[in-house]
Image: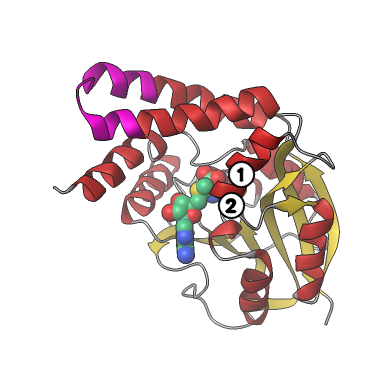
Amino acid sequence: MDADARYSALFLEVYGTLPRAGPGGDEHTLRALELVPGSSPRTVLDLGCGPGAQTLALASALPQADIVAVDVLESMVAEAGRRIADAGVGERVEAVAGDMIAPPVKPGSQDLIWCEGAIYNVGVTEALTGWRPLLRLGGTVVFSEVVWLVAAPPGEALAWWTAEYPPMSDRAGVEARIAAASYRTIGSFVLPASGWWDEYYAPMQGRVADLRARLSDDPVALEVAAQAEAEIDIFRRYSECYSYEFFVVQPTC
Ligand SMILES: C[S@@+](CC[C@H](N)C(=O)[O-])C[C@H]1O[C@@H](n2cnc3c(N)ncnc32)[C@H](O)[C@@H]1O
């Protein structure tokens, strides 16, 4: 295995085995779901589903819904599939491999498109524009996106995030990208810091400690560990400056 493949494998060992593959929690998924207007959704797409935590929260809150969860990584799809089977909801919830910009559903078929902590892979305007034809009349998109919470972020945090995710903006910047796709915002809220720790950074710290103990003389493993620790450290020191924000949006026409 070359160094790149090994980095990816170790990266997945740290990030791909967490309860969630990004900040969040069932209570926040359900809070966002409560903001969705109209009758209970019957067809749901969960895009960039990762290991499927929010897929199962949605499945449990929407017992009448058929849900298709999509992720580009086979290992994520496999983990989501295992959790779906364990939860006993496999007759109406499935995880499939695919690209979130071209999910395997018919045009005009979806009441709800969900994209928790994953829309950054495509871009807000690009994703919303691409998903528009998949929505039923009155359909809704819910997504979360990382935002600055302060007008002048500290230089260290700004530098770290600008390197990680150049399009990062404040709430107004996301609103502008929503409007550019001809959608309007129905509701929004900021994920509290606990949503980053409980199911994401706290278990990640355990994975990193394990990696360091097991592969203490492996430079690739140490690089993966250092990257995760740097991310956690930035959040520990600047968590009041940024977070994910949920946006519940509908097309304007
Ligand atoms: C930060 S994780 C969030 C996963 C999950 N929603 C959660 O919160 O646990 C982002 C996910 O998007 C997936 N992803 C990246 N690009 C994608 C694409 N083009 N289509 C589908 N999934 C994608 C990644 O494999 C990863 O599982």
- Residue at the disc numbered 2: 165
Residue placed most toward the observer, 91 or 149: 149
Give the image quarter of residue 149: top right
**Considering depth in this image, is 105 or 252 the residue closer to the camera?**
252
Q: Is residue 250 above or below residue 9?
A: below
Is residue 56 shown to the viewer in this render?
no
Answer with left or right where residue 11 lies relative to residue 249: left
Q: Identify the residue shown where x is 19% and y is 22%.
A: 217
Neighbor class of circle 1 (other Cα within 10 Å; few <14, some 14-19, many 20+) is: some
Q: Is residue 224 left or right of residue 198?
A: left
Location of residue 139 with respect to 225 vertically, above or below: below
Numbered tag placed on residue 161 in the rendering: 1
Residue 116 position, x and y percent, is 61, 51
Q: Disc 1 on helix, strand or loop?
A: helix
Residue in the picture at 73% in, 59% down: 40
| Helix, strand or loop status at disc 2 | loop
Instruction: Specify start and end residues of the magenta stretch as a single range.
Output: 208-223
Q: Position of residue 108 (x, y in %)?
A: 64, 82
- The kind of residue tagged 2 is Tyr
Q: Residue at x 78, y 63 (%)?
A: 249
User: Is 132 placed above or below 16 here?
Assistant: below
Q: Residue at the left extreme?
A: 1
Cβ atoms at labels 2 and 1 below 8 Å apart: yes
**Identity, as a three-letter code, of the amino acid under mark 1:** Trp
Q: Is residue 130 magenta?
A: no
